[in-house]
Image (cartoon, rainbow, N blue to C red):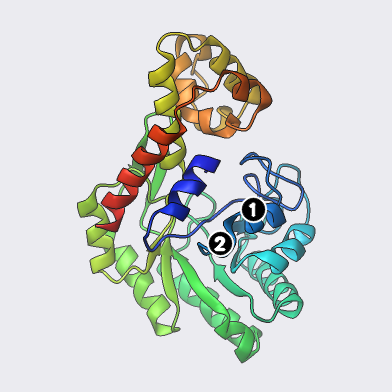
């Protein structure tokens, strides 16, 4: 996500929303335009729904219990994705933290809506476990709070490879369809994460199954990065240095990845993380209009 992506989605007339992670936008700022949660919400000004993606414990730049972030989210965003699973891989530990987070947010703002579950790269859920999660939440939360859960994350076996700009894994339509039916049984909307780099036919298969929503994020950031690379030509050393020093590329590459031999690939991986860096702003090409048009063209393909 970037300011250009935000502006493009606001200007585009479509059924889209924002899903900022804590690293992108948070109570103490993030890498997207240095916005705090309040500043970002003020900028959007109700024109597009905002959902906190991966809210809670250990999801920010520094490890924390997540409550300061959640408290601020309750003032500003429309939906909070409660995601304790990065730090609680055990089912019952994760369930307990999930319940605590939901109740904290609900009693802070009774109009708050929620998303539960997580993506496969964080913790794989079986169909049975997803059913158990919703069953346990149903019996451990009051009716009003359980009714505030709007979305449930469903998994289909896919992930992301930013280095090669592609969707990875093996798509399992049977598993996805069964998870969607679990959501429907409890009266919840289904949402898949990691929906980047799919074809229109691949989206159609999912929505024909009954999927309600899908998250797409790095693809837009990389689209903007590619525009800058094209404009800069071979003069990319400064952009590379900024990206390299950020270390945001490290989690996306194999141990044998050689940055010096793969400068453009490294920039493609993490160029969107540094778009608000002061050093980048000094060398940034003045092509915002062209970038926003390309983003809108991509949005149009999704809209179709």
Q: Of the numbered discs in the image, which one, if any, rests on residue 50? A: 2
189 up-or-down from 66: above or below: below
| Residue at the farthest left position | 201
Disc number lying in front (1 or 2): 1
Bin the neighbour count of mark 1 within 10 Å (Cα to Cα): few under 14, some 14-19, many 20 and up. Answer: many
| Residue placed most toward the observer, 72 or 201 | 72
- Residue labelled with disc 1: 40
Which residue appears at 49% of the width and 18% of the height?
Answer: 256
220 up-or-down from 301: above or below: above
Q: Quadrant of residue 246?
A: top right
Which residue appears at 59% of the width and 19% of the height?
Answer: 244
Which quadrant, please, contains the C terminus?
A: bottom left
Which residue appears at 41% of the width and 19% of the height?
Answer: 231
Q: Secondary structure at mark 1?
A: helix
Residue 95: give x, y in percent of width and height.
64, 70
Which residue appears at 52% of the width and 22% of the height?
Answer: 255
Q: Secondary structure at mark 2?
A: loop
Q: Do the numbered discs 1 and 2 sit on residues whose CB atoms are within 8 Å?
A: yes
| Residue placed most toward the observer, 54 or 29 | 29
């Amino acid at each position: 996500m970037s300011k250009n992506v935000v502006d493009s989605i606001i200007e585009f007339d479509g059924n889209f929303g924002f899903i900022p992670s804590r690293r992108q936008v948070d109570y103490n700022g993030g890498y997207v335009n240095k916005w705090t949660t309040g500043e970002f919400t003020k900028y959007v000004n109700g024109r597009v729904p905002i959902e906190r993606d991966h809210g809670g414990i250990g999801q920010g730049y520094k490890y924390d219990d997540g409550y300061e972030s959640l408290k601020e989210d309750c003032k500003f965003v429309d939906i909070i994705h409660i995601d304790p699973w990065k730090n609680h891989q055990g089912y019952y530990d994760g369930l307990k933290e999930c319940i605590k987070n939901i109740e904290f947010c609900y009693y802070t703002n009774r109009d708050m809506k929620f998303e539960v579950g997580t993506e496969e790269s964080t913790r794989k859920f079986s169909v049975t476990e997803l059913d158990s999660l919703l069953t346990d939440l149903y019996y451990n939360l009051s009716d009003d709070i359980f009714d505030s859960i709007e979305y449930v994350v469903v998994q289909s076996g896919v992930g992301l490879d930013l280095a090669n700009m592609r969707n990875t894994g093996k798509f399992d339509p049977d598993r996805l369809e069964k998870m969607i039916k679990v959501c429907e049984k409890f009266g919840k909307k289904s949402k898949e994460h990691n929906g980047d780099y799919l074809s229109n036919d691949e989206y159609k298969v999912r929505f024909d199954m009954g999927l309600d929503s899908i998250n797409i994020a790095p693809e837009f950031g990389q689209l903007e990065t590619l525009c800058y690379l094209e404009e800069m030509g071979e003069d990319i050393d400064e952009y590379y240095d900024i990206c390299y020093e950020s270390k945001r590329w490290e989690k996306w590459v194999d141990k044998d990845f050689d940055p010096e031999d793969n400068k453009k690939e490294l920039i493609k991986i993490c160029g969107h993380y540094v778009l608000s860096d002061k050093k980048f702003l000094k060398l940034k090409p003045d092509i915002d209009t062209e970038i926003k048009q390309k983003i809108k063209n991509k949005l149009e393909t999704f809209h179709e």
